[in-house]
Amino acid sequence: MKFSRLLLATAVFSLLLPLSLLAKDNSNKHSIKTQISQPATVAGTALAPGQYKVEWTGTGPAVNTEFKLNGKTVATAPATVSEIANGSEPNSVVMQKAANGTQTITGITGKKKALKFGTEASTGNQGAAQ
């Protein structure tokens, strides 16, 4: 009787262990899906127009982001993440025109989070004027 219980416990453990290894802790993983409608740069990397998923891990305020196009990381950039109030335009991209005419991404707003890129992100000065 003890042997059959031990065998059953071993079988159950053997079945549950792979499932627990597959389960990821996504509690600190965040993302914003957004459309970039024109060529732009972020952290010196050129981005083509397209539907991007911007991912980061952690609660911030300073985070490292990954810009993914078709599931492939095409750029990484430091950012400052903050909570936003209801009523903000979700999934919008804020750009600033550089002296050479290129558009630089300075911010992305999601449903509940906002990302700021550039000197504000690298220094953590959220209140600095752009």
Image (cartoon, rainbow, N blue to C red):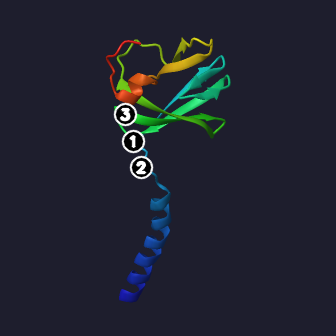
Q: Position of residue 15 (x, y in %)?
A: 49, 68
- The mark nearer the N terminus, 2 or 3, is 2
* Numbered label attached to residue 25: 2
Rendered position, 68 above or below 48 = below
Q: Residue at x 45, y 71 (%)?
A: 12
Looking at the rendered structure, the kind of residue marked 2 is Asp
Residue 33 vs residue 56: left or right? right
* Amino acid type assigned to the residue bearing label 1 in the image: Asn
**How many C-alpha atoms fall within 10 Å of the one at disc 1: few (<14), some, or many (≥20)?**
few
Q: Which mark is residue 17?
A: none
Dot 1: what SS? loop
Q: Position of residue 109 (x, y in %)?
A: 46, 20
What is the spatial separation of the Cα atoms under label 2 and label 3, in whole angstroms? Answer: 20 Å
Circles 2 and 1, Cβ within 8 Å, touching? The answer is yes
Mark pair 3, 1: CA separation: 13 Å
Determine which residue is flagged by label 1: 28
Residue type, mark 3 in image: Ala
Q: Residue at x 57, y 28 (%)?
A: 44
On screen, residue 10 above or below 40 = below
